[in-house]
Amino acid sequence: MRRRLYAAIDLHSRTSVLGWMGGRGKMIDTIRFETSEANLREKVGALRAKEIHLTIEAAPLARWAAGILRPLVTRLIVCDARRNRLISCAANKDDEVDTESLCRLVRLEELHEVWMSNNEARQIFREAVFDLLKLRDRQRELKTLIKNRFRTQGVLRLNGTEIFHPVKRRRWIDQLPEAHRHGLLVIYGLFDSALAAWREQLREVRRLGAAFPEIARFREVPGIGEIGSAVFCAIIEDPHRFQTDSQLYRYSALGITSRSSDGKPLGYERLERRGQRELKNLSYHAWRTGIRAGSQCDVVRRFYLASKQRTGSARHGRLNTQRKILKTLLRMWQNNSRFEPKLFLQNPTPKPASGRRRRGRPRRSRSRKG
């Protein structure tokens, strides 16, 4: 029996490839098998070693496979496929080659691990919330399609949401030629079905969310409503997964990234493009709601105005406020505490991006003739 094996599985819905490597970096074998729970247990359980370090790439099958394989190995790493440049940029690429590259990366400890919860109740709640968001997006698509149908027939002044009302929409439909009404009615039927499914899914989210008391406390934060608190709870899952605030900001697509070489900037400082954009959207809508003059609690508006004055930029002030909202939600969850307006106005947020222009040849001024 070997002391340690470094193994990897390239998961696919039909067939998967398992490969393993010894401690000296020599590839031992790879096998292809039909993807199923029984085969995963059998193939990984047949590996003989005192320690087995196994990795799989983050994908739709990863959460299901991780639950099966975690008890069978010493360490299971769910890695970020976007960081594995050895695989994505390889000249020769197939499942066996990818598996060997994963084995080498796990042996060198060069994998970027993706956090994944083991709490089944929170996984079910997360799935329910993401289904709710997908139904929301479906409604948006159909609303855009309905508006475009009216505009193609010259109906340009659409009165707010009246065209989506189940009764009031009739007077708008009557403005269209008879030949163009049938297709629009079909789209309206799809919209009504999506809206009914969204409402039914919202009831399911409420039922599942009753098991998590932090959701009710999140609604104390100005601008955070019922759906926003459920989305934050479902996506974060575990408040102690972040060691620093900057990790939360990067995960929420609000972190600042910069690139330099030899002390010289290679481009602009900008927001990190990767991350959970639903958290970024959540914080944006909370900021927009919180700065309204009629809000009962004005701490969001006061924080925004102070940050705007300090940075000299409305955009940086908004981004700092968005980060502050997410940080406040996380601290409330970690400390099992309620919202404190005085604490919201304390602890300055990170400095905004400086917006430096990358260095290069100076621009030439154009002289006008005449």
Image: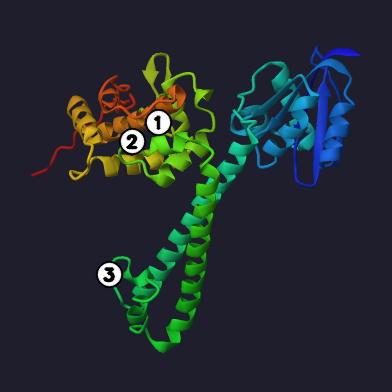
Separation of marks 2 and 1 at Cα, in angstroms? 8 Å
Front residue of 10 and 233:
233
Q: Give the mark toward the camera: 3 or 1.
A: 1
Give amino acid for label 1. Leu
Cβ atoms under marks 2 and 1 closer than 8 Å: yes
Q: Is residue 223 left or right of residue 292?
A: right
Provide the secondary structure element on which disc 1 rests.
Answer: helix
Q: Earlier in the sequence, mark 2 or mark 1?
A: 2
Q: Residue at label 2?
A: 221
Image location of residue 276, percent across then percent down: 48, 38
Front residue of 96 and 348:
348
Q: Residue at label 3?
A: 159
Q: Give the mark toward the camera: 2 or 3.
A: 2
Separation of marks 2 and 3 at Cα, in angstroms? 33 Å
Residue drawn where x is 67% and y is 17% of the image: 109
Q: Residue at label 1?
A: 329
Circle 1 Cα neighbour tier, 10 Å, few/some/many (<14 / 14–19 / ≥20): many
